[in-house]
Image (tube, rainbow, N blue to C red):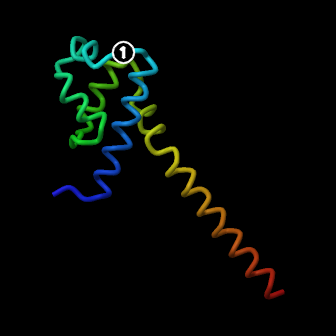
Amino acid sequence: MTSNLELDIYQKIGKALKDIRQEKKLTLQQIEKMSDQYAPRISKAENGKLNLSLGWIIHYCNVLDINPSEVFTRAFAEDFKSQQLENLLEKFETYTSQNSKD
């Protein structure tokens, strides 16, 4: 069974792939012709309804002529920002609590 966290990951990666494909002005039918994947399967992947293997993601990135890191950067940009903010707030709280003791 797929956990909610896994579903969230698949949705984020799928959305990033879809956004990149659309920015390149490519249709699902064009991608189907460029790869060995059927349009309905690609659509499922882009909508987070398919468990994606790393190999599949890399293959799709090759079809789109992009580096896989672009997909992961886009997919998790907000998560990275949130984590950075949490780290900053933790440091601030530590700093203020140390200064209040002085």
Q: Which residue corresponds to mark 1?
A: 26
Q: Which residue is drawn at 29% across and 32% down?
A: 57
Q: Is residue 66 above or below residue 86?
A: above
The quadrant of the image that shows the N terminus is bottom left
In the picture, measured across the screen, residue 68 lies left or right of residue 31, that is right
Q: Which residue is drawn at 18% across and 27% down?
A: 40
User: x, y percentage for residue 67?
Assistant: 41, 26
Residue closer to the observer: 20 or 54: 20
Furthest residue toward bottom = 101
Image quarter of residue 48:
top left
User: x, y percentage for residue 74?
Assistant: 47, 37
Residue closer to the observer: 25 or 70: 25
User: x, y percentage for residue 71?
Assistant: 41, 34
**How many numbered marks, from 0 up?**
1
Image quarter of residue 26:
top left
In the picture, measured across the screen, residue 74 lies left or right of residue 17, that is right
The quadrant of the image that shows the C terminus is bottom right
What residue type is disc 1 on?
Leu
Q: Which residue is drawn at 28% across and 19% down?
A: 28
Q: What element carries label 1?
A: loop
Q: How crowded is mark 1: few (under 14 residues within 10 Å), some or many (20 or more)?
A: few
Residue closer to the observer: 31 or 84: 31
User: x, y percentage for residue 92?
Assistant: 71, 69
Q: Residue at x 36, y 39 (%)?
A: 13
Q: Is residue 42 above or below residue 36?
A: below
Q: Is residue 99 above or below residue 15?
A: below
Q: In this view, does 51 lie above or below 83?
A: above
